[in-house]
């Protein structure tokens, strides 16, 4: 009988029963180190991880199907892992709606400047802000989340263009808004660098919920300080939820034109439930001989 080992995963009774029906189940605490993760998963056919030390441990694993209840783990070479019998599946789409909600809130906050006017206590002069209608938005990344963001932007009357792998990034020069929806792989590493930000349309905005692996924060800040980018919104992934003391968050906070949140874009009850359900379905499919949501990365 196949064996499932969970690391740092809290299962409810229904989830536990589902896994026990398809394999032997061993529930363990999250690992304290890379070595601890490798040792704990030594005899697993399936490893269901909460993500702690997982990315760093992948090259050391052998003959195991790995799942986790979220979307982005980070960059790795799936071809090399597969030579060791290691396959990695994410919970694609689990947090999509929650990320889209955060993104649209931030877009409205940047263009309409609504935040400072909520519960205002002082009079202020009449002013006009920008509508989203007819604004040109470039979404960099046309995956599960990026495509859904595009649908929402179109619902607000925005003119949406997608950047796909191999496209010419010079199309960004006409955009009023750039949304970074890239995942982490070798082709996306620092793709949005200082030259990219400095070449954007004057007065444009930048929104991202993905990892800084894909973009240059210093370059973004330089473009803001140079008057090219009018403002930005960043959810600080992969720092811990609610962590406002890490270096990346503090650097983003240092510029008053950047709206910063401490890795909260994903954080809804629905996204959490969806991620866990997709992880369980990935396990059930694997044990039936099927591969769902297995990642291909280089």
Image (cartoon, helix red, strand yellow):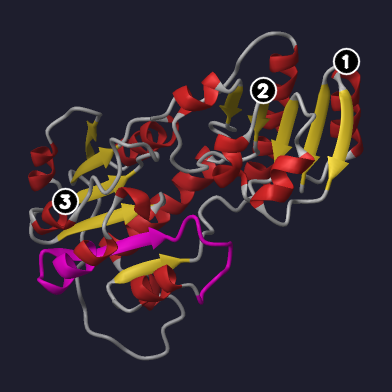
Q: How many residues crowd around disc 1 within 10 Å: few (fewer than 14), some, or many (20 or more)?
A: few
* Circle 1: element type: loop
* Circle 2: element type: loop
Instruction: Tell me, yes or no, whether the highlighted magenta stretch contains residue 98.
Output: no
Q: Are marks 2 and 1 in contact (CB under 8 Å)?
A: no
Q: Which residue is mark 2?
A: 63
Quadrant hosting residue 24: top right
Q: Is residue 35 above or below residue 20?
A: below
Residue at 38%, 30% (x, y): give it.
298
Residue 279 vs residue 95: left or right?
right
Q: Which residue is mark 1?
A: 1
* Residue with the most extreme top position: 289
Residue 99 percent location from the top left of the image? 48, 46
Select label 3 or label 1 by which is in front.
1
Determine if residue 247 is in view: yes
Residue 97 vs residue 153: left or right?
right
Residue 87 percent location from the top left of the image? 59, 24
Q: Are marks 3 and 1 in contact (CB under 8 Å)?
A: no
Determine if residue 158 is in view: no
Q: Which residue is mark 3?
A: 176
- Give the residues in magenta: 220-245
Number of the label disc, if any, that sits on residue 240: none
Q: Is residue 66 above or below residue 258?
A: above
Residue at 25%, 50% (x, y): give it.
132
Residue at 47%, 56% (x, y): give it.
237
Select label 3 or label 2 by which is in front.
2
User: In 3D space, how far apart are the residues under numbered discs 3 and 2 (Cα atoms)?
Assistant: 48 Å
């Amino acid at each position: 009988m196949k064996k499932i080992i969970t690391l740092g995963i809290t299962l409810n009774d229904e989830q536990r029963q589902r896994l026990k029906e398809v394999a032997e189940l061993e529930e363990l605490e999250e690992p304290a180190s890379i070595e601890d993760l490798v040792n704990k998963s030594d005899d697993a056919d399936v490893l269901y991880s909460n993500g702690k030390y997982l990315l760093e441990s992948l090259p050391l694993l052998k003959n195991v199907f790995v799942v986790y209840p979220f979307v982005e783990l980070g960059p790795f070479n799936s071809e090399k892992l597969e030579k060791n019998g290691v396959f990695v599946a994410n919970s694609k789409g689990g947090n999509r709606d929650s990320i889209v909600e955060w993104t649209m809130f931030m877009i409205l906050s940047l263009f309409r400047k609504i935040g400072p006017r909520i519960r205002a206590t002082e009079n202020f002069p009449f002013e006009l802000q920008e509508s989203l209608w007819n604004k040109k938005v470039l979404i960099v990344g046309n995956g599960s989340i990026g495509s859904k963001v595009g649908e929402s932007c179109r619902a607000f009357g925005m003119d949406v263009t997608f950047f796909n792998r191999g496209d010419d990034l010079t199309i960004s020069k006409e955009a009023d808004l750039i949304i970074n929806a890239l995942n982490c792989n070798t082709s996306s590493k620092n793709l949005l660098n200082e030259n990219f930000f400095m070449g954007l349309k004057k007065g444009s905005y930048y929104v991202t919920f993905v990892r800084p692996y894909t973009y240059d924060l210093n370059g973004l800040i330089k473009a803001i300080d140079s008057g090219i980018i009018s403002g930005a919104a960043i959810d600080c992934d992969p720092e811990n939820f609610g962590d406002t003391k890490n270096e990346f968050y503090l650097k983003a906070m240092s510029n008053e034109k950047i709206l910063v949140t401490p890795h909260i874009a994903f954080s809804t009850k629905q996204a959490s439930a969806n991620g866990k359900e997709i992880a369980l379905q990935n396990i059930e499919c694997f044990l039936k001989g099927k591969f769902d949501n297995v990642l291909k990365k280089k």
